[in-house]
Image: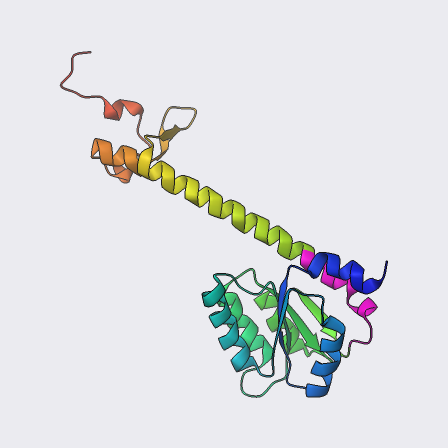
Amino acid sequence: MHCFDEIKKYTSNLTLLYVENDKALRDTTLDLLKGLFRELVVVDNAEDGYALYTSYALENNNSFDIVLTAIDMHNMNGLEMSRKIKEHKKNQIIVIFTKHISTEYLLEAIYIKIDRFIIKPLLTLDDIKSFLIELAEKSALQARLENKNFLLQQQREIIDEFVFLTISDECGKITDISQAYLNFTGYKREEILGKNHSVFRNQDIDK
């Protein structure tokens, strides 16, 4: 199978933000990446890159799947932009594209939890095949986890609104209670947690 087709099997549903101020390198890289992603957006500086990232997330209710950025840029560098993006979305996949990296930059990148480093320039798709497939698989896994968490949150909201539910430990002490049950009984959560279910017994009723 052709390398392009093999990579596209993994990346065709993904979105990529590419931030690079070196025009010649940017054009060369774009020639390699063109057609691999569902959406590929290019910006030539980190300030505009971050602004575009946040506006895209707001408009689409979802962030870019992968951010690919150089380090050395005017005003804000790629690591500064990456730090701000990670503050916005801590598990955002970010790849640093660089000719070399100093110890100072490397330590900062580790602290920010950058996912990958690529050495400039890219010559062929074979140079990036393995890491693109790896990142695409990681992005797909994150999407499944986020969807699962969303569904669990929806389930919790439904239970809190409509279901009388308590959860107890093996000793019979209440460890969780739905808001619907609290509303019905008039208790506050902190008054119930750690107590036995006998707390709900109506003291006015004969045993």
Q: Is residue 112 magenta?
A: no
| Residue 5 location (% of width, % of height) | 79, 61
| Residue 134 location (% of width, % of height) | 72, 58
Please, which residue is most extreme toward the left here?
Answer: 204
Way the structure is coloured: rainbow
Determine whether 133 is above or below 24 in the image: above
- Quarter of image, res 133: bottom right
Judging depth in this view, the residue of 59 and 20 nearest the camera is: 59
Q: Is residue 131 magenta?
A: yes
Judging depth in this view, the residue of 138 and 194 nearest the camera is: 138
Q: Main secondary structure of the magenta part?
A: helix
- Say which residue appears at 63% left-offset and 79% top-offset: 71
Determine whether 112 is above or below 152 in the image: below
- Say which residue appears at 82% left-offset and 76% top-offset: 123
Horizontal placement of 55 versus 11: left or right?
left
Horizontal placement of 6 versus 41: left or right?
right
Horizontal placement of 72 versus 88: left or right?
right
Give the position of the N terminus as an image quadrant: bottom right
Please, which residue is most extreme toward the top here?
Answer: 207
- Say which residue appears at 52% left-offset and 71% top-offset: 53
| Residue 161 location (% of width, % of height) | 31, 39
- Say which residue appears at 30% left-offset and 38% top-offset: 179
- Quarter of image, res 181: top left
Judging depth in this view, the residue of 14 and 69 nearest the camera is: 14
- Give the magenta range: 122-136
Query: How many circles with numbers are drawn on the protein?
Result: 0
Horizontal placement of 105 versus 169: left or right?
right
Determine whether 192 is above or below 135 in the image: above
Give the position of the C terminus as an image quadrant: top left
